Image (cartoon, rainbow, N blue to C red):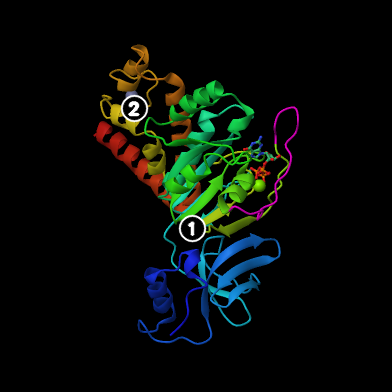
């Protein structure tokens, strides 16, 4: 029998075992020599660190593996060691690469996203909604963590909570102080023994929170600038850390801009109330600008809908659609041709 005690804390379960055996073409339950499964716990310029049954191994990027493994992936490593295969993912947290067109994989097999905001700076609703969209795209749960609550009074913390929950009435918001050590047990109870990724801008307090949750100094932290509380990009690699009570945390480098590279449906999930309301618009393709019979415009007019929220919804939708078309240029061309044919047919019918 193989001894899985070293990889079970990383989330190894019968499903992954089955996936591993299937990938190698072995019948279930048979012994396998040589290639071993492991979880990518670190991804940096030099390569990968993979937690295996025999302990962590440093693996080269090696011959190209598709998809390229990212932190959180379960991979099969051979004896070199090289990753030879990425096991089919249960989820992928991704964003639009900074300043670029491409997609950037942030972490794989993530169950929960912590949207980390430091209370030493204003809570930004748009940013929360963008991160919610990334989480929805990955099929992950999310909750907002307002940390550094020790830097503001209870009154200000309460105001920040209300502001954050405006992103979604059902949004869970946890207020805590990672440095002060309060609110941590509460958060642990919320996340459970799952794979949890921390997302937020540099200096928000992600690594400090990781240390508080793990209850050890496992991640380096850095000072923020005095004037504007901006961070110095202390964390430079994505790294997975084990929680003592079960579950894993993925600490990530701070991101300046949350570029959405999402399925447009993920945007819809972020704004379910507006999507529902838009069903009442007269036209299916209503842009909610000045179309007659627009339910969204009516909501804005009678004060039941927040125009800023509509603005953020529309801009995220446009961004996600553009990304989807860029991701699949063939489909985009097909769509163009279809539209072209449609117009041609209409014109022909007219002139008949
Ligand atoms: N007062 C207070 N300061 C905190 C708290 N959490 C973090 N900090 C401080 O905020 C600064 C930034 O913390 P980090 O944990 O390094 O931030 P980060 O989000 O990991 O930043 P990057 O790695 O650059 O993305 C450090 O000086 C921390 O000591 C908190 O709960 N209270
Ligand atoms: Mg950090
Ligand atoms: Zn409308």
What's the residue at 53%, 57% (across, down)? 243
Q: Quadrant of residue 317?
A: top left
Is residue 315 at least partly visible in the picture?
A: yes
Is residue 167 left or right of 62 when viewed as pictured? Answer: left
Quadrant of image for the N terminus: bottom left
Name the residue nearer the viewer: 52 or 99: 52
Q: Mark 2 near ligand 3 (CB under 8 Å)?
A: yes
Residue 177 vertical placement versus 298 (above, below): below
Name the residue nearer the viewer: 169 or 192: 192
Tell me the SS state at disc 2. loop
What's the residue at 46%, 22% (across, down)? 308
Residue range highlighted in magenta = 215-230
Q: Residue 4: percent from the left, percent from the top?
A: 47, 75
For disc 2, the marked residue is: 286
Q: Earlier in the sequence, mark 1 or mark 2?
A: 1
Q: Residue 159: percent from the left, percent from the top?
A: 51, 22
Q: Quadrant of ligand 3?
A: top left
For disc 1, the marked residue is: 245
What's the residue at 37%, 16% (across, down)? 300
Q: Residue 105: percent from the left, percent from the top?
A: 55, 54
| The stretch drawn in magenta includes residue 330 | no
């Amino acid at each position: 029998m193989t001894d899985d005690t070293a990889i079970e804390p990383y989330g190894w379960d019968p499903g992954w075992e089955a996936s591993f055996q299937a990938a190698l073409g072995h019948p279930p339950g048979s012994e396998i020599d040589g290639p071993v499964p492991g979880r990518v716990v670190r991804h940096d310029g030099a390569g990968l660190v993979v937690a295996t049954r025999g302990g962590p191994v440093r693996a080269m990027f090696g011959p190209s593996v598709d998809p390229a493994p990212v932190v959180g992936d379960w991979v099969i490593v051979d004896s070199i060691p090289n990753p030879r295969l990425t096991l089919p993912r249960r989820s992928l947290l991704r964003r639009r690469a900074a300043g670029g067109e491409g997609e950037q994989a942030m972490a794989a097999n993530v169950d929960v996203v912590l949207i980390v905001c430091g209370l030493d700076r204003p809570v930004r609703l748009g940013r929360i909604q963008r991160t919610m969209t990334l989480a929805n795209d990955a099929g992950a749960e999310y909750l907002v963590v307002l940390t550094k609550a020790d830097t503001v009074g209870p009154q200000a913390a309460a105001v920040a909570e209300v502001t954050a929950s405006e992103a979604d009435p059902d949004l869970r918001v946890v207020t805590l102080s990672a440095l002060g050590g309060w609110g941590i047990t509460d958060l642990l109870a919320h996340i459970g023994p799952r794979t949890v990724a921390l997302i937020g801008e540099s200096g928000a307090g992600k690594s400090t929170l990781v240390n508080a949750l793990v209850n050890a100094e496992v991640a380096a932290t850095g000072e923020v600038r005095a004037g504007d509380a901006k961070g110095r990009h202390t964390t430079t690699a994505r790294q997975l850390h084990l929680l003592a009570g079960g579950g894993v945390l993925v600490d990530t480098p701070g991101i300046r801009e949350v570029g959405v590279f999402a399925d447009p449906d993920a945007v819809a999930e972020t704004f379910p109330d507006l999507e529902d309301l838009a069903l009442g618009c007269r036209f299916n393709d209503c842009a909610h600008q000045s179309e007659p019979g627009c339910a969204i415009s009516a909501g804005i007019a009678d004060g039941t809908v927040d125009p800023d929220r509509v603005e953020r919804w529309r801009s995220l939708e446009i961004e996600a659609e553009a990304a989807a078309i860029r991701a699949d240029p063939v489909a985009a061309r097909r769509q163009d041709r279809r539209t072209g044919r449609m117009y041609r047919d209409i014109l022909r019918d007219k002139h008949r």
